[in-house]
Amino acid sequence: MRFLPLALLLVATPALAQDLTPAETTKVDSIVTDTLARNGVPSASVAIVRDGKIVFAKAYGKQSETIATPRADAPYQIASVSKQFTAAAILLLKDEGKLSLDDNVAKWVPGITDGDKITIRQLLSHTSGLQDYWPQDYSFAAMEKPVTPQRIIDRWAKKPLDFAPGTQWQYSNTGYVVAGMIVEKAAGKPLLAYLRDKVFKPLGMKVIDQDLAVGKGFPQGYHRYALGPVRVEKPAARGWLFAAGELAMSASDLAKWDIARLNRSVMPANDWQTQETPILLTNGKSTNYGLGVFTGTAKGHRYVEHTGEAVGFLSENIVYPDDKAAVVVLVNSDFSDAFTGIASQISELILPPAAEPAVAGDTETAKTAQARAIFDQLRAGKLDRATMTEDANYYFDATAIGDYRDSLAKLGDPASFTLTRPARLRGGFVNRNYTVTYANGTKLAVVTYAEPDGAGRYEQFIVMPAE
């Protein structure tokens, strides 16, 4: 399905793009414009680092209802990509002797469940056991009202832990809210102000609070129910991302940070190494996650990576330290995996090719059948609301049900419905992802979160285009 193909206007920064060959530049343009059109994503901003310098920065498409021509310097909300900056603030404060990674949380923020057993290091590595306050890929009802970090802590960080600290890995925005409060207490100033002094100004980065990156002149978020119309998304009320994802910046500014990572500047080299070293669980198993970043090797290339999701925005930032390269892709939609698809294709273009890794098979037949049944209900414009939690029923209002029905029914019966991400914990729920494939080649992604016990009601059941 194509969306506003005539709006795919291009803005380049020629001085930055000259280090790509004309053929490579043409290929990047093709990758981005084709992917946006195919998935209905309104716009993307892309930056490429090669040999330790920015060689390409370009904006594509419709950034908002009021921005006539896309701007490469426009600040997109980068959401959870911000976590590595929060972790960097902690590391810098450690260097100043103001805290230790092994400090107990209770020393800094009182009242948190088992705060005397959770360390700052565990907050930053998602091994604290604190339940995630926003595992959903949609804005839930409470997000219509402003919130403070303390109120998030009062509601989510005082619940029983999901597991004993250090024994499991589970993504937790809540842990980063706590970490942000610790930064502000140790630094004696707001987190953003501390980062501006220590990181953003030295690197020449223009960064603002994502809650302020709203309105005329800023990229606007968009949403889509299944394959329905692309709609302007209502931003969350202020305060919901804080240290878990509060930053907005251009792709080029984020690339400046990536170059600092490659060059080991701004922070001491040992701090960068600490951030990029995967944390081990108490059983000795690696989490493949350091302090605010995922790490690993894909297609023969070592990477340091993180994605982000805000209301109406998705982002991918991936650095290849051994190749002195990085790719930044920011989009103004919270649907589709176009952002990671674009980054993957650009990475293949600028890095030496390697063999594809093997894909794990389907091991949960019963759960897959259950998910398929819900998918078929949505195709028919129906939903057994007893299978949904309160938040999921809030999400599936009349507009959502109508868009799901109207966009999915016309596709006919799927050729296959397969598990593509096996079960993993997230925010007290069990996340599973599926791919729906049709005979004509159309693919959809289904991202689910379900209760771990009892009837296993769904907290989330979102369908979106897949690459």
Image (cartoon, rainbow, N blue to C red):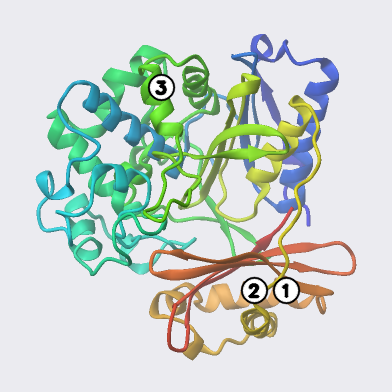
Q: Residue drawn at (46%, 44%), measured in percent from left and top?
A: 289
* Disc 1 from disc 2: Cα separation: 6 Å
Q: Quadrant of residue 85?
A: top left
Q: Position of residue 325 (x, y in %)?
A: 63, 22
* Disc 3 from disc 2: Cα separation: 39 Å
Up/down of 130 relative to 105, above or below: below
Q: In this view of the protein, can residue 213 be seen by the observer?
A: no
Q: Position of residue 207 (x, y in %)?
A: 39, 27
Q: In this view of the protein, can residue 226 be seen by the observer?
A: yes
Element type where label 3 sits in the image:
loop
Circle on res. 404:
2
Tell me whether the residue at label 1 lies in contact with that at label 2, contact meaning CB atoms closer than 8 angstroms: yes
Label 3 packing within 10 angstroms: few (<14), some (14-19), many (20+)? some
Tell me whether the residue at label 3 lies in contact with that at label 2, contact meaning CB atoms closer than 8 angstroms: no
Looking at the picture, tell me which residue is in the foreground, 380 or 372.
372
Up/down of 236 relative to 196, above or below: below
Q: Earlier in the sequence, mark 1 or mark 3?
A: 3
Q: Residue drawn at (36%, 59%), measured in percent from left and top?
A: 167
Element type where label 1 sits in the image:
helix
Amino acid type, label 2: Tyr
Q: Quadrant of residue 97?
A: top left
Circle on res. 24:
none
Element type where label 2 sits in the image:
helix
Question: As drawn, which residue projects farthest toward the front?
Answer: 284
Q: Which residue is mark 3?
A: 206
Amino acid type, label 1: Leu
* Disc 1 from disc 3: Cα separation: 41 Å
- Where, quadrant-wise, is the N terminus in this rendering? bottom right
Q: Which residue is mark 1?
A: 408
Q: Residue drawn at (69%, 85%), measured in percent from left and top?
A: 380
